[in-house]
Image (cartoon, helix red, strand yellow):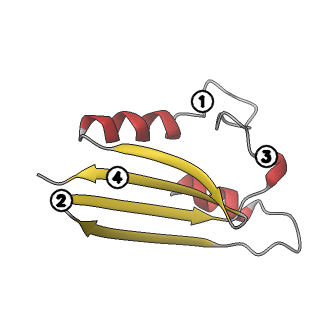
Amino acid sequence: MDNAIEAATQCPLGKTKYMEISITERNQFLFIIVKNSYNQEKLQPDLSTSKENKLEHGFGVKTMKRIATKYNGHVDFYLEEGLFCCRVTLQIK
């Protein structure tokens, strides 16, 4: 969520700053979806950090994927209607 907040606040002037979070449970799965506005010029195709000091930044996506895998889930990133979206799916035991 830190990345989503930061991305939304860095939107260019005139673009709406937006963030939406939904958490739902269905059929023994937990779905966490975060959607946010973003600055298209800063979005890296491989989702790597756009910050200068690469040694101190860029761990969020990798960490999310590792945690989701640990709990029999997965993480998806996609663009939808001008928003950057992250969906985390976790199996509930």
Residue position for label 3: 42
Circle 1 sits in a helix, a strand or a loop, which is it? loop
**Residue 24, percent from left and from top:** 32, 70
Point out the frontmost of discs 2 and 3.
2
Sequence-first tag of 3 and 1: 3
- Marks 4 and 3 sit apart, C-alpha to C-alpha, by 26 Å
**Residue 32, percent from left and from top:** 39, 61
Residue position for label 1: 56
The type of residue carrying mark 4 is: Thr
Q: Give the residue at the far right of this rendering.
A: 13
Circle 4 sits in a helix, a strand or a loop, which is it? strand
Q: Are marks 2 and 1 in contact (CB under 8 Å)?
A: no
Seen from the viewer's position, the closer of residues 16 and 10 is 16
- Marks 2 and 4 sit apart, C-alpha to C-alpha, by 10 Å
Q: Give the residue at the far front of this rendering.
A: 27
Sequence-first tag of 1 and 4: 1
- Marks 3 and 1 sit apart, C-alpha to C-alpha, by 18 Å
Looking at the image, residue 46 lies above or below residue 92: above
Sequence-first tag of 2 and 3: 2
The type of residue carrying mark 2 is: Gln
Q: Residues within 10 Å of mark 3 (few under 14, many from 20)?
A: some
Looking at the image, residue 28 lies above or below residue 62: below
Residue position for label 2: 28
The type of residue carrying mark 1 is: Glu
Sequence-first tag of 2 and 1: 2
How many numbered marks, from 0 up?
4
